Image (cartoon, rainbow, N blue to C red):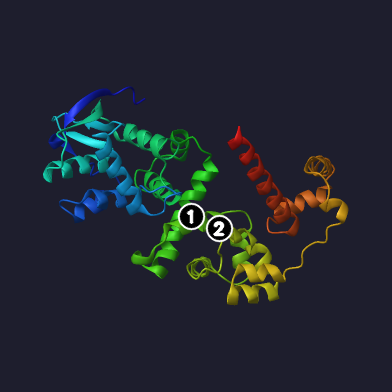
Amino acid sequence: MVGAGKLQNLPVADIELDRSNPRISKFLEQYDSPTPEQLFLALGAASDDDQDASTSFEKLKSSILRNGGIIQPIIVSCRPDGRYVCIEGNTRVALYKDFLASRTKGDWSTIPALVYPDMNPQQIDAIRLQLHLVGTRPWDPYSKAKYLHYLRTEEMLPFDDIVEFSGGRKKDVVDAINAFQSMERYYRPIVGDGNFDSTRFSGFVELQKPGVKEAIVEAGFAEADFARWIADGKLYPLHHVRDLSKILRTAKARKLFLEFGAKRALEALDRPGLSDALLNAKVGDLAHALSYSLLRLPFPEADQIRNDPGSDLSLALRDALESLQQLLQVARDED
């Protein structure tokens, strides 16, 4: 249990940046006095909708200047020796310190903070997970996976604890960690640190879906080849990763994919013919018919889905499921 912190206005000069934060610790070791923008970039603070991190940082800086201070308090742990360590809000603290040093107009000597007495690592992890995985200021998917990987491999936190803190499913946590490992092991060496694009992460998440890795291996390729395809844009948009099972199974489609990419390969695949009656049927009627057909599905076909996740039937069902989930999500968003 974390409990409730005490709201105080703390002297900015007394607050230390959190060198235990795995997302900025190495960065802080490299720079004695990192700029606020450098910290912001190191934290991966730009959202999925705002991929221009510099623009996002300037928005934060302008908002603080315009309002004469922050609206959301930072979170601080008070150590037994009296030191205040910023657990959440390092960029905002750095901005205040920068405003003080540059004599920016305004009062930047104190900052609103929720102060907790000497938080232990588990309490700190719980706060970060709640804020950035399920809270109001989520990290981008790659940054979430990086932190989950750190908790599992460095902190050795049990999967059940990570799942409980983040409010997700164990499979999602495992997939995110595996996707991060794969991206770091195979993709980063290909593109280098300077061209590393964390927005390609979703492709490595798709790689964890049933049947995809199996199809790659059966076609004589490996994860390193997959990373090269991502780097070369062969799988753009990234949702085409889920089509690899179909593409790699057909010689003509595979050849087109390796030369031109997934879009051209998919054009070469034979699509099942659909009657006018099916194409013109109402979605509700199709949903009822699908439910009825699934209840009467013969055992051999059901067994095929379980034993061959890359089969045409399995892929068709997965495509239908994803389309339905997208439709239902739109309906929920409009409520």
Tell me if residue 115 comes above or below residue 178 in the rendering: above
Residue 77 at x, y = what percent? 24, 31
Residue 20 at x, y = what percent? 25, 43
Determine the image quadrant of residue 307. Answer: bottom right
Where is mark 1, residue-wise? 179
Q: Which amino acid type is shown beneath numbered disc 1? A: Ala
Please indicate whether residue 34 sits to the left or right of residue 322 in the image.
Answer: left
Where is mark 2, residue-wise? 207
Please indicate whether residue 6 sits to the left or right of residue 47 in the image.
Answer: left
**Does label 2 or label 1 sit earlier along the sequence?**
1
Q: Can you tell which mark lies on residue 257?
A: none
Please indicate whether residue 332 sits to the left or right of residue 121 in the image.
Answer: right
Residue at x 36% of width, y 37% of height: 128
- What secondary structure is found at the residue carrying circle 1? helix
- Label 1 crowd (10 A; few <14 / some 14-19 / many >=20): many
Residue 251 at x, y = what percent? 69, 75
Residue at x 32% of width, y 53% of height: 54
